[in-house]
């Protein structure tokens, strides 16, 4: 009998735990099983509409990237030479039984653009801004199980041009369905700040890593109650370290009496200590986890988990930027949101790949140009160790394109800036709010009032980070945004010759170079002589007609747009002045659109340190040699030229005193960098053979690098960045394709046309080669190599198993690569 009673007791306890768990919120991945139609049919909002012939797909989705490139598209090549248009998405679903008596909301991380949403035929609202998170309450119109519900989304990106770069079209970020209690935290209603101080002889002092330190975490929460008599409320917060160990927990009562009326907003706050905290930094991005729980009559009814990092940030008018009271030069890049052949459709594996490539280069900061990123991008920056400048707008009321955000700014800017700050303010990675890029109101007195309004809106929600605007006018009497007096740090784009004058023009101010360089390059193209500087275009007059016939640009770092400078000169300028906190290079990766200096058929940019396929250009190694402690030796170009041709051989190197170059064993001399250069160069008369570079320190060899003259193309090589990927239907493997000669050397001038096919548990979702004027669709399974290389992207199909990729090309030995998917 005792044994029976014991089992009954266990069952009751288990059922109680299940019931309690059912009370807290449930976040459902809502990306799968959508129907899509490219076109406009207003009847599609109705539940009874027949969408059986529509395309079946999963989100995130960008319909623009699926098209061929065409000159005629109204976005022009500035917008990527891809279409906009109108599209509809519909999804039928049945709520889980656990949704009974719950509030149901739908969250969109980003829809480009002018989205409108209906649930069961009821209109929920519109959101013009394509980069902003938004949510709708479905509760008043939702049907409980077993009834079927219909969500319909119209996306209108038909008014073109509306951007200076490629935007994509569609529901291109993640969608979630959230089931929560009638008493619940606001989606981004938790605001967590932190700090650290040291103790010297029992006296609190400024943080010093050599002394005993104490951290603090301050938590403010906002929750909504939708019942008239909610009873006793209690909110608890528990902090866990990175290993999952509980550090501290406390309960906080509501700040106001909530036994009042339906719809009350409840605020609570509290401060929690942490002894000897591990500080978040770019080299050790240590994250704590805060679990916030609200109890109603001692029963948990909602829970939010927030990852935080404890760190100190500070700008100084003379010494630049400090992280955790240690000086840190911002080594940043600007990044648009597209993911190359994937278009704008967000994929965490693709974003992680980009960030890891940048991390290897020594990059420590990202500017999200010129809009808020996907939330998962910030999660990755938190985890990998990047600082982030979170940017709101590319324009205010004054337009840059006919149909851009200036049309929506008057009505929507207040809500958009609020939603950006609320969403992103808990991320330890992000350290600056930017309210705009090259805003034209800096030349107009209206800029004063707008700047004050936007800065006040940011600081009302987060006063722990500085607010800036990326400016172009660096004379104070001409810049009305500066004259507002509202900016905490002054960020200037380009004009590096004026850096030396900034402290005198703006006494006591703090500075950062928010955008630099705008140098141009096509991977593995070399314009000789290398010391001949090209300014392409030389001015703002159009069209530019003096470039290369194949629409390429030299990769020697000797070409830049008229407003910019070379990579080397720009970095030298930033490093010269301690008061410049650092820089954001334009830009990290080539992106779709803005193909300065060329017209069609160029359709993607030339600015990147890394090309659109993710292959580093040579200048990548200049940054690696200056931004990291790695030992670097990179020589270029390739060694396939015409007999007797004069070729400039460059080397980027670090941790060495000199580099000596050899051709077939014969020394061509030693070179050492001067104080005002980051590369060395030899002028060599070409003959086939082997170039060898040797770097030395104190006479001892540090590194050796060789480049050999390649023979005819013979075979294809396939190399995966990851041979095993998740079987979730989302994960990716990026396959580098190389054309090799019989000895295994890359053939640098090969342009072989390669066809790819896949069998098994995967599919091809994109191909690329990095060439900015390749007009073949990025979704094609056929691609010409560019300078001996191309890329194919494989995605798991949602099933566990094997994947076989095959590459064939006339006259070449085929290649086969085996991958697999796992849980």
Image: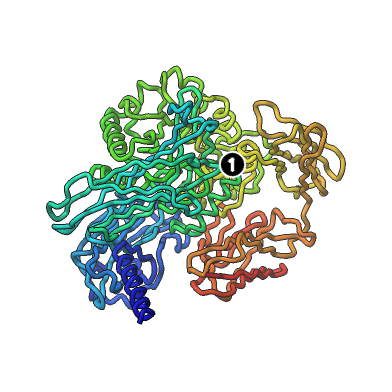
Residue 797 screen position, x and y as percent = 50, 72
**Mark 1 residue crowding within 10 angstroms, few (<14) / some (14–19) / many (20+):** many
- Tell me what residue is drawn at x 56 percent, y 55 percent: 613
- Tell me what residue is drawn at x 32 percent, y 73 percent: 12
* Colouring scheme, one of rainbow, by chain, secondary structure, one colour: rainbow
Q: Is residue 391 above or below residue 2?
A: above
Q: Quadrant of the N terminus?
A: bottom left
Q: For numbered disc 1, what is the local secondary structure? A: loop
State the residue in front, 225 or 126: 225
689 left or right of 648? right
Residue 461 screen position, x and y as percent = 30, 40
State the residue in front, 76 or 90: 90
Which image quadrant for residue 679?
A: top right
Which image quadrant for residue 105?
A: bottom left
State the residue in front, 517 or 347: 347
Q: Identify the residue at the far right of this view.
A: 666
Total residue callouts: 1
- Tell me what residue is drawn at x 39 percent, y 60 percent: 174
Which image quadrant for residue 724?
A: bottom right
- Tell me what residue is drawn at x 69 percent, y 63 percent: 717
State the residue in front, 253 or 266: 253
Q: Is residue 463 above or below residue 783?
A: above
Q: Identify the residue at the far front of this view.
A: 2
Residue 73 screen position, x and y as percent = 40, 56
Q: Which residue is mark 1?
A: 362
- Residue 77 visible, this angle: no
Residue 199 screen position, x and y as percent = 47, 30
- Residue 506 visible, this angle: yes
């Amino acid at each position: 009998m005792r044994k029976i009673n014991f089992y009954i007791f266990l069952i009751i306890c288990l059922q109680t735990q299940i019931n309690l768990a059912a009370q807290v919120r449930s976040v459902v991945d809502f990306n799968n099983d959508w129907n899509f139609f490219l076109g406009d049919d207003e009847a599609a909002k109705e539940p009874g509409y027949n969408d059986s012939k529509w395309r079946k797909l999963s989100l995130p989705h960008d319909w623009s990237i699926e098209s061929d490139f065409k000159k005629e598209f109204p976005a022009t090549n500035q917008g990527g030479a891809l279409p906009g248009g109108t599209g509809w998405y519909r999804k039928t679903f049945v709520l889980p039984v656990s949704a009974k008596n719950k509030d149901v909301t739908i969250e969109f991380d980003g829809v480009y653009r002018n989205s409108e949403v209906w649930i069961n035929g009821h209109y929920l609202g519109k959101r013009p801004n394509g980069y902003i998170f938004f949510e709708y309450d479905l509760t008043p119109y939702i049907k409980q199980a077993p009834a079927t519900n219909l969500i319909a989304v119209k996306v209108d990106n038909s008014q073109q041009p509306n951007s200076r770069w490629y935007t994509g079209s569609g529901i291109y970020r993640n969608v979630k369905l959230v089931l929560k209690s009638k008493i619940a935290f606001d989606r981004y209603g938790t605001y967590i700040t932190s700090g650290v101080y040291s103790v010297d002889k029992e006296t609190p002092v400024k943080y010093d890593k050599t002394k005993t330190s104490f951290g603090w975490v301050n938590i403010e929460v906002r929750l909504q109650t939708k019942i008239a008599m909610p009873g006793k409320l209690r909110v608890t917060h528990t902090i866990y370290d990175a290993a999952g160990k509980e550090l501290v927990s406390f309960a906080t009562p509501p700040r106001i009496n909530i036994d009042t009326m339906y719809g009350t907003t409840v605020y609570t706050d509290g401060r929690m200590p942490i002894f000897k905290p591990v500080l978040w930094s770019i080299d050790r991005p240590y994250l704590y986890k805060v679990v916030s729980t609200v109890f109603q009559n001692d029963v948990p009814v909602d829970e939010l988990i927030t990852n935080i990092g404890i760190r100190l940030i500070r700008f100084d008018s003379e010494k630049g930027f400090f992280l955790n009271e240690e000086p840190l030069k911002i080594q940043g890049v600007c990044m648009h949101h597209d993911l190359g052949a994937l278009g704008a459709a967000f994929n965490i594996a693709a974003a992680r790949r980009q960030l890891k490539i940048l991390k290897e280069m020594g990059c420590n900061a990202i500017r999200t140009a010129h809009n808020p990123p996907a939330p998962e991008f910030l999660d990755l920056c938190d985890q990998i160790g990047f600082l982030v400048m979170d940017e709101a707008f590319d324009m205010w009321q004054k337009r840059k394109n006919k149909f851009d955000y200036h049309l929506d700014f008057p009505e929507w800017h207040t809500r958009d800036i609020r939603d950006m700050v609320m969403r992103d303010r808990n991320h330890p990675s992000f350290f600056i709010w930017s309210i705009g890029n090259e805003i034209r109101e800096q030349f107009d007195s209206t800029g004063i009032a707008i700047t004050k309004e936007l800065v006040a809106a940011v600081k009302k929600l987060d006063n722990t980070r500085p607010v800036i605007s990326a400016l172009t006018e660096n004379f104070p009497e001409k810049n009305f945004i500066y004259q507002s007096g509202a900016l905490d740090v002054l960020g200037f784009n380009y004009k590096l010759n004026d850096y030396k004058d900034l402290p005198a023009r703006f006494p006591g101010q703090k500075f950062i170079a928010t955008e630099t360089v705008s140098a141009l390059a096509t991977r593995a193209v070399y314009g000789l002589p290398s010391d001949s500087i090209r300014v392409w275009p030389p001015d703002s007059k159009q069209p530019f007609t003096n470039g290369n016939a194949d629409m390429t640009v030299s990769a020697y770092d000797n070409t830049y747009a008229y407003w910019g400078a070379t990579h080397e000169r720009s970095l030298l300028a930033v490093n010269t002045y301690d008061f410049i906190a650092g820089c954001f290079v334009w830009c990290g990766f080539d992106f779709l659109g803005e193909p300065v200096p060329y017209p069609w058929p160029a359709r993607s940019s030339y600015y990147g340190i890394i090309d659109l396929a993710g292959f580093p250009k040579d200048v990548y190694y200049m940054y690696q040699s200056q931004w990291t402690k790695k030992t670097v030796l990179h020589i270029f170009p390739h060694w396939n030229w015409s007999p007797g041709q004069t070729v400039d051989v460059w080397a980027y190197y670090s941790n060495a005193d000199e580099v000596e170059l050899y051709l077939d064993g014969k020394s061509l001399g030693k070179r050492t960098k001067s104080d005002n250069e980051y590369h060395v160069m030899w002028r060599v008369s070409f003959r086939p053979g082997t170039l060898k570079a040797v770097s030395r320190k104190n006479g001892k060899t540090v590194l050796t690098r060789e480049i050999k003259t390649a023979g005819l193309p013979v075979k294809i090589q396939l190399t995966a960045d990851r041979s095993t990927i998740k079987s979730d239907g989302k994960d990716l493997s990026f396959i580098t394709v190389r054309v090799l000669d019989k000895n295994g050397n890359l053939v640098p001038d090969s342009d072989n046309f390669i066809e790819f096919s896949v069998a098994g548990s995967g599919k091809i979702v994109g191909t690329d080669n990095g060439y900015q004027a390749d007009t073949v669709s990025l979704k094609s399974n056929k691609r010409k190599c560019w300078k001996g290389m191309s890329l194919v992207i494989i995605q798991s199909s949602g099933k566990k198993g094997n994947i076989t990729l095959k590459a064939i090309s006339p006259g070449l030995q085929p290649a086969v690569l085996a991958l697999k998917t796992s849980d």
